[in-house]
Image (spheres, rainbow, N blue to C red):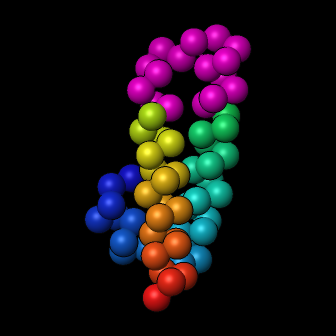
Amino acid sequence: MKQAEITQLSVTELQEKFSETKKSYADLKMAHAISPLENPIQLRNVRRSVARIATELTKREIQ
């Protein structure tokens, strides 16, 4: 997800998206451990999406 998309979401949507993305990352990581992914760059992209969403949630909690 791009940062512009993340900033437009509400807090509840962000929390839902965070849990979905985190689960997706865990699934990809497990699949990659069993047999190499065709596109291992997916791991990096999903991990960065998790970080972006977590950062936005933290930023909103502070405000």
Identify the magenta region.
28-43
- Residue drawn at (70%, 14%) of the image: 34
Residue placed farthest to the top in the image? 35
Q: Residue at x 46, y 76 (%)?
A: 59
Residue 27, quarter of picture: top right
Query: Between residues 41 and 59, which one lies in front from this camera angle?
Result: 59
Nearer to us in this view, 25 or 56:
56
**Residue 54 screen position, x and y as percent:** 53, 62
Q: Residue furthest front?
A: 62
Residue 40 lies left or right of residue 28; in this view the side is left
* Position above or below: 24 against 11: above
**Residue at (47, 22) in percent of width and height:** 40
Principal secondary structure, stretch drawn in magenta = helix
Q: Is residue 10 visible?
A: no
Asked whether 18 falls inside the magenta stretch, the response is: no
Is residue 46 among the parts visible in the rendering? yes
Q: Give the residue displayed 44% in from the left and 46% down from the top.
A: 48
Where's residue 58, x and y in %? Answer: 52, 72
Between 44 and 13, which is closer to the camera in this rendering? 44
Locate residue 7, reporting x and y percent.
36, 72
Question: Is 35 inside the magenta-drawn segment?
Answer: yes
What is the quadrant of residue 9 in the picture? Answer: bottom left
Along the horizontal axis of the image, is 48 left or right of 15? Answer: left
Residue 17 image offset from top left, x and y in percent: 56, 61
Q: Residue furthest bottom?
A: 63
Q: Is residue 7 left or right of residue 50?
A: left
